[in-house]
Amino acid sequence: MSDLLERLRGRGWRVTSQRRVVAEVLDGDHVHLTAEEVHARAAERLPEISRATVYNTLGEMVSLGEVMEVSTDGRAKRYDPNAHHPHQHLVCSACGIIRDVHPSGDPLANLPQEERFGFTVSQVEVTYRGVCAACA
């Protein structure tokens, strides 16, 4: 069983065949699919699954905090199932592929107190940009 599916079941999420296939499509370390890509892959496994079901299921997973929505440079939202594993993203500025990266150190430590302007910082999102090997 996928890690994502196990987490969803642990939260009492009712697992239907449609929800299962969406969770299985999203499972993996570097998966950052658009809703359309999720639908296309899910339809290969379960041809009767509708786009609306995929969008609703993704919305539920995001609301539960089990999947993150990732938006970069005005491109389509992508869905990241690694919501419980701290990481940053590396984005190709040419093709838009996204990879999870795990830099060492605490990114919050790089923000000096005087640059926080009284904010209590609760979350840091760092996005590295460049050109992937396939596009170079």
Image: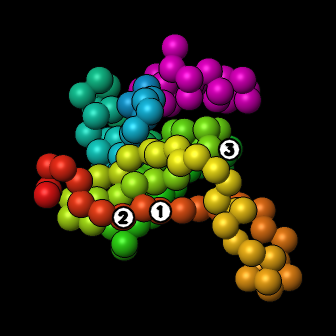
Q: Mark 2: give few (<14), some (14-19) or many (20+) Cα within 10 Å.
A: some
Give how far apart the Cα atoms at labels 1 and 3 are. 23 Å
**Residue 57 horizontal side relative to residue 108, left or right:** left
Residue 35 visible from this viewpoint = no
* Circle number at residue 45: none
Judging by the rendered image, the residue that carries numbered circle 1 is: 127
The C terminus lies in quadrant = bottom left
| Magenta-drawn stretch contains 49 | no
Q: Which residue is mark 2?
A: 129
Which mark sits nearer the N-terminus, 3 or 2?
3
Query: As displayed, is residue 123 above or below residue 8?
Result: below
Tell me the mark number nearer the camera, choosing from 3 and 2.
Answer: 2
Pinpoint residue 100: horizontal percent, then vertical percent: 45, 45
Residue neighbourhood size for the residue with mark 3, other residues' Cα within 10 Å, grouped as few (<14), some (14–19), many (≥20): few
Amino acid marked by disc 1? Thr
- Disc 2 residue type (three-letter): Arg
Q: Residue at x 77, y 79 (%)?
A: 116
| Between marks 1 and 3 in the image, the one whose residue lies nearer the viewer | 1
Residue type, numbered disc 3: Leu
Q: Residues in magenta?
A: 1-23
Q: Nearer the viewer, residue 46 or 122?
A: 122
Q: Residue at x 81, y 76 (%)?
A: 113
Look at mark 3 in the image and give the residue it sits on. Answer: 64
Q: Are marks 1 and 2 in contact (CB under 8 Å)?
A: yes
Is disc 1 placed on a helix, strand or loop? strand
Dot 3: element: loop
What secondary structure do most residues of the magenta stretch adopt?
helix
Image quadrant in which you'd find residue 112: bottom right
Q: Is residue 98 above or below residue 72?
A: above
